[in-house]
Amino acid sequence: MYCIVDVETTGGVKGSARLTEIAIFRHDGQQVVDSFHSLVNPECPIPPFIRHLTGISNEMVQDAPLFSEVANRVIDITQDAIFVAHNVGFDFNFIKKELEWLGHDYLRRTVCTVRTSRKVFPGFPSYSLGKLCNSLNIPLNNRHRAQGDAAATVRLFELLLEHDAHGLIPRVGGASIAMMD
């Protein structure tokens, strides 16, 4: 299994920044078999730059669940799955940080669709999610929102699986291939 993940946050991984939104699509290598999406109350103000980028306002998250209220769902849906994200270090480390604050160890194998895309689809001018989706004709709706970005990353991941002639992505249910991370 794979879990394609995207998060929106109040800032960078280091320091006290918090999650504001999370989307996870559980994928069996053929199709999405489960999903989870939620706004998250970060228990702090969302900086103006982030509000402008994501469109997520303080009012939108004021009645959203705290991360502690969705943590078990995040752990469960990603259990026994490879954690996949566009720039995986950001999304994985943010979730790991939030879970560690709650006393959970969070260990998952990871695949980065940025790094994998550079190898499977060399020569594009940019590997940012928006520009890569444009180059590959992948629809990208609700840019800089977790569910929209994660849905586009699912389609990107499916194209990567389809075109991965060198075994860069570990196959689930079969022999493991060396990880990129």
Image: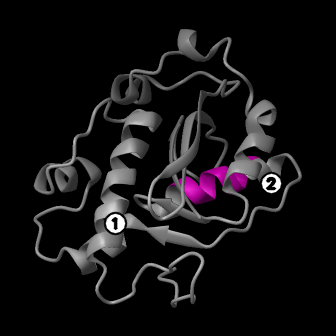
Tell me residue 52's x, y (percent).
35, 23
What residue sits 42% from the left and 61% below the top?
Answer: 87
Above or below — where is 91 with respect to 82? above
Q: Are marks 2 and 1 in contact (CB under 8 Å)?
A: no
What residue sits 21% from the left and 48% below the top?
Answer: 138
Real-space Cα separation, disc 2 to disc 1, in angstroms: 26 Å
Tell me residue 112's x, y (percent).
43, 68
What residue sits 54% from the left and 53% below the top?
Answer: 91
Q: Which numbered dot is residue 82?
A: none
Element assignment for label 1: helix
Q: Amino acid at mark 1?
A: Val
Looking at the image, tell me whether mark 2 or mark 1 is earlier in sequence order: 2
Q: Which residue lies under the disc numbered 2?
A: 100
Q: Which residue lies under the disc numbered 1?
A: 114
Q: Residues within 10 Å of mark 2 (few under 14, many from 20)?
A: few
Above or below — where is 32 with respect to 84? above
* Residue projecting furthest to the right: 103
Look at the image and give the residue range highlighted in magenta: 91-98
What residue sits 45% from the left and 54% below the top?
Answer: 31
Tell me residue 131's x, y (percent).
17, 51
Q: Amino acid at mark 2?
A: Glu
What type of secondary structure mainly makes up the magenta span?
helix
> Residue 44: which quarter of the image?
top right
Left or right placement of residue 33 versus residue 167 in this view: right
Number of numbered callouts drawn: 2
Above or below — where is 135 with respect to 173? above
